[in-house]
Structure formats: C-alpha cells, structure tokens
Amino acid sequence: MIYTSNWIERLNRSFRRVLKMRLSMPDEKSMLVLLGNVTRNQRAYGRRLTHMDKKQILFPQQNNSPKEF
C-alpha cells in the first residue's frame, strides 16, 4: 500500500485532468512543459511556487547547454 498526502493526490488529479483534455502531444518535451505549467499553477502548502523561472524553462539561453526534460 502506498501512502500519499492530499496535495500529492490533488496534483495527480490535475495532471490526469489536463492530459485527458489534450489527447495527443507532439513530443515528450511539450508534455513535460504542460505538466510543469500545471505544477506552477498549484499551491504547495499554501504558497506559490516562485523559485521556478518560467521564461528560462520555456526559452533557455543559446549559450547555455540544453536542459534534458
């Protein structure tokens, strides 16, 4: 038996709901970006997830090495 907390269950439910609405994705990277946006919109322990830089994730700098998703 796996024990989880309510916020993990809520996040998993949000992932399933979003993926059900979008039946096909062009590639794995676009799916991970979509799930990342769902995660950013959720609140963890009543606080916004501010440590994630959306612009850097979506548009990494040309000079930086590409990040694997």
Image: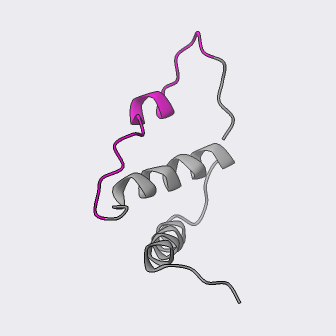
Q: Residue, x 35% and y 56% (percent of image)?
A: 41
Tell me where residue 6 appears, x and y as whole percent: 44, 80
When the figure is inspected, residue 66 is found, relative to residue 21, above or below; the finding is: above
Tell me where residue 10 appears, x and y as whole percent: 44, 76
Q: Viewer-proximal residue, 53 or 21? A: 53
Q: Viewer-proximal residue, 56 or 6? A: 6
When the figure is inspected, residue 6 is found, relative to residue 47, above or below; the finding is: below
Which of the 4 image quarters holds residue 24?
Answer: bottom right
Tell me where residue 28 appears, x and y as whole percent: 67, 48
Residue 57 can be seen, yes or no: yes
Tell me where residue 55 appears, x and y as whole percent: 40, 30
Give the total of numbered labels: 0
Residue 63, magenta (yes or no):
yes
Q: Residue, x 58% and y 50% (percent of image)?
A: 32
Protein image colouring: one colour
Q: In the drawing, does residue 2 fall left or right of residue 45? A: right
**Outermost residue toward the top?**
63
- Magenta residues span 46-64
When the figure is inspected, residue 39 is found, relative to residue 62, above or below; the finding is: below
Residue 42, magenta (yes or no):
no
Q: Residue, x 63% and y 43% (percent of image)?
A: 29
When the figure is inspected, residue 64 is found, relative to residue 30, above or below; the finding is: above
Q: Viewer-proximal residue, 4 or 23? A: 4
Residue 27 can be seen, yes or no: no
Q: Main secondary structure of the magenta part?
A: loop
Q: Residue, x 66% and y 41% (percent of image)?
A: 69
In the rendered image, the quadrant that contains the N terminus is: bottom right
